[in-house]
Amino acid sequence: MDSENLLSILFVLDSSPQNGASLAFFNSFIEQLTDCMANETALTVFYPEFSDREEHFSLSITQMPKYRRAVTYIPTRLDSFSETYLNEKMDDVFNFILKDDHFDVIHVWSLKNHSFSYPALAKERGIPVVCTIADGFLFSNSIFEKGFAENGEKVRVSNFVNSSVTSFIKRFVTIFKPEHRSYWFENIGRFSRYYNRTSNGDIMSDVFEERTESAAEALSFCDKFILFSELEYNLFYRPLIPENKAVFMEQGTLRELDFWNRPFEIEGAVRFCFMGEILPEEGILELVDAFNILYSEGFRNELHIYGEMHENSNYFIRLKQRVKNPDVFFHGPVQGGRINAALNTADVLIIPAKWFRNDTFLVNNAVNERKALIVSGKNAIAEKVRKSGRGIILDEVTPQTIAEAVSELERNRKRLYYFMRITDDFKAPDISENCSFLTSLYGELAKNDRESDPLLLAKKLNRRRKERQRG
């Protein structure tokens, strides 16, 4: 296709596609997708980077070999919690990017580390907006989920907001220590309840209500929504997203090893692995306790754990002290291009998550590598395992239920081999299919007339009302 006729697309991401600090290997999927999409569209990728050395909210635009990259530098802590969801400085950066180029479609993959005003700002310019619901940041999974404050617990916001102490530490570190961080904590860790227990830094419930209203308003300005799971849509988003705007797309994988479709037999004990975040929400504590139980009963199955340890040392040290089984090994985080290599250190992938997981990317890679699965129920992963018949689904996440599932696969090799059967009957797209699907969707949206959205006027009137009330 002639480069002049390519659709001009803007991807809005929460971090660099090459940065591993994203929940459930989402950036690994995005990195592969951007490489493919750059061949089909004129692509610009916009994301923030945490930095206390660069000028905050400055913008750097660079032409990369395949696509254009726009990076803005944001502080690790803000002056108020409200700025984490409505940020005028981020709005200014976004507006500048929109002025700099004529985009046919804007695809918001994540609003984390951005401003919820982006979809409305795009609508002011008549640009169609596609929004991906990739995690629970807006309404469900994070510390902002309903019920957390309603049950009497309050959330500490010192992880998000500047204080005299954090400001002093920031200045000290900036002067004496070179800036080199993975930003795991900013992107993942501080959304865990473990790092947000009740303290003197509580905030009022009306701030959470405003955040929820702002999130719902942002969704109202989007033309289409990409979801990875019908279950997630029905649980969290059906009241907010009309069916005619919901589009379901399964995360594709790169097809690599066709020779795995051959008979095999496991010699020795079955090996297991965990890949995810070393946080309470991931069920990692129950997993470690399960393998302690197995060891006391005479099982010698290995457990290989892949997840952040250095940035997450606050929790990891406590977890490590709990391990009694010498066959439990910690390997650190997995680079995006090494997911399949890590999977092949084991025969079974265990995902005992207690928060909602929709990362079909990891599950599809595991099945393509002919790995059996043990997963927690009531989430998109369980939905995938149930339909494909590739593993065991836990009714509840406890050390005993995990230990029973592990021992079942060790003892019942016939059942294990059935879960690890050849992949001829496994239906999963590859990245190129995702790319073609999205390009077609963008093309249809770009054809539509760019009329002013009636919701825009409603939002402006609502904003004026709030300003009068504050005055």
Image (cartoon, rainbow, N blue to C red):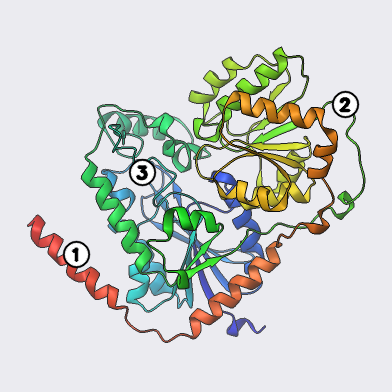
Q: Is mark 2 on a helix, strand or loop?
A: loop
Q: Could you give the CA–CA distance between mark 1 and mark 3, rounded to whole angstroms?
A: 23 Å
- The residue at 31%/53% (across/down) is 212
Towards the viewer: 283 or 416 = 416
The amino acid on which the numbered mark 3 sits, given as a three-letter code, is: Phe
Query: Dot 1, how many residues are within 10 Å of its Cα: few (below 14), some (14-19), or many (20+)?
Result: few
Work out whether mark 2 precedes mark 3 in sequence or the reverse, and give the earlier one.
3
Q: What element carries label 1?
A: helix
> Residue 445 — which label?
none
The location of residue 422, given as percent across then percent down, is 85, 51
Towards the viewer: 153 or 14 = 153
> Residue 268 — which label?
2
The location of residue 245, given as percent across then percent down, is 46, 71
The reply to whether discs 1 and 3 touch (Cβ–Cβ < 8 Å) is no
Query: Dot 2, how many residues are within 10 Å of its Cα: few (below 14), some (14-19), or many (20+)?
Result: few
Foreground mark, 2 or 1, reads 2
The location of residue 130, given as percent across then percent down, is 47, 68
Query: Dot 3, how many residues are within 10 Å of its Cα: few (below 14), some (14-19), or many (20+)?
Result: many
Q: Could you give the CA–CA distance between mark 2 and mark 1, rounded to whole angstroms?
A: 66 Å
The amino acid on which the numbered mark 2 sits, given as a three-letter code, is: Gly
- The residue at 38%/64% (across/down) is 219
Residue, disc 1: 463
Q: Is mark 3 on a helix, strand or loop?
A: loop
Is 285 placed above or below 230 here?
A: above
Work out whether mark 1 precedes mark 3 in sequence or the reverse, and give the earlier one.
3
Q: Is residue 400 left or right of residue 96?
A: right
Q: Could you give the CA–CA distance between mark 2 and mark 3, rounded to whole angstroms?
A: 45 Å
Is 386 placed above or below 469 here?
A: above
Query: Please, which residue is most extreme toward the left here?
Result: 471
Q: In this view, does 131 lie to the left or right of 470?
A: right
Towards the viewer: 55 or 10 = 10
Residue, disc 3: 144
